[in-house]
Image (spheres, rainbow, N blue to C red):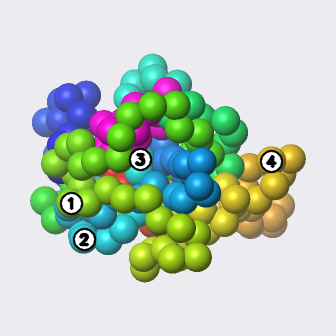
């Protein structure tokens, strides 16, 4: 899997220690209401396209860029549908990360679905009633994106007591508190 230059430089300084990164994922429907998915090269699992947001990059721009880089499909983000935090992830090389995940519902404006980089084994459009197996997190992001256009972006909230407890625990332990979020999108 390709690693962005800024991240390679950062890893040269911090090694495999945990990093907090932002990621943008897309839910793209074509004119036949089929959803665009890619089968990941690292896990073989089908997932929504997406990836790391570069420093200074707008999240919606990153979503469109990642979609094109991975699938060859050009999109315009129309709305933010989900904001979540991933569970901590440890990659095969030992790199540790946790992601702030922003999911956008997008419309197609050009391109042709194809494997467009080394991160995907396959890219395809799927009817909503004939999806391949998706993990629970991709299913959740898809469901939130398919909710009515007037609906606000979905997110998790532990409640006032949970937020106060997480803040207190983070301060006492010197680490960031988690909120039980999602597995990472195709990054």
Category of crowding for the residue at label 1, using alpha-carbon neighbours closer than 10 angstroms: few (below 14), some (14–19), many (at least 20): some
Residue lying at 53% horizontally and 67% vertically, measured from the top left = 127
In terms of image quadrants, where is residue 60? top right
In whole angstroms, how far apart are the C-alphas of marks 2 and 4? 32 Å
Look at the numbered discs 2 and 1 and tell me whether their residues touch, using CB distance below 8 Å: yes
On residue 186, which mark appears? none
Tell me if mark 2 has few (under 14), some (14-19) or many (20+) residues whose alpha carbon lies within 10 angstroms of its own: few
Determine contact: label 3, label 2, CB under 8 Å: no
Q: Inspect the magenta stretch and tell me whether residue 64 lies in it.
A: yes
Return the residue at label 4. Answer: 149
Is there CB contact under 8 Å for labels 1 and 4? no
Find residue 44 and report its horizontal and vertical position in percent: 24, 71
The disc at residue 44 is: 2
Check residue 121 in the rendering and tell me which mark sits there, or answer none: 1
Tell me how far mark 2 sits from mark 1, CA to CA: 7 Å
Residue shown at 24% from the left, 55% from the top = 120
| N-terminal label among 2 and 1 | 2
Q: Nearer the viewer, residue 147 or 153?
A: 147
Residue interval drawn in magenta: 61-74
Residue that carries the numbered disc 3 in the rendered image = 50
Task: Give the residue displayed 28% in from the left and 48% down from the top.
Answer: 114
């Amino acid at each position: 899997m390709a690693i962005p230059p800024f991240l390679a430089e950062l890893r040269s300084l911090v090694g495999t220690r945990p990093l907090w990164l932002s990621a943008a994922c897309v839910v793209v429907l074509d004119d036949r209401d089929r959803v665009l998915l890619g089968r990941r090269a690292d896990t073989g699992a089908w997932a929504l396209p997406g990836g790391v947001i570069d420093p200074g990059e707008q999240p919606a721009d990153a979503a469109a860029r990642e979609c094109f880089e991975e699938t060859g499909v050009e999109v315009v983000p129309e709305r933010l549908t989900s904001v979540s935090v991933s569970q901590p992830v440890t990659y095969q090389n030992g790199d540790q990360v946790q992601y702030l995940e922003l999911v956008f519902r997008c419309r197609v404006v050009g391109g042709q679905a194809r494997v467009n980089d080394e991160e995907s084994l396959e890219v395809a459009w799927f009817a909503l009633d004939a999806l391949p197996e998706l993990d629970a997190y991709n299913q959740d992001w898809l469901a939130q994106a398919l909710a009515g256009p007037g609906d606000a972006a979905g997110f998790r909230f532990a409640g006032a007591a949970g937020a106060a407890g997480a803040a207190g625990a983070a301060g006492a332990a010197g680490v960031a508190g988690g909120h039980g979020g999602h597995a990472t999108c195709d990054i």
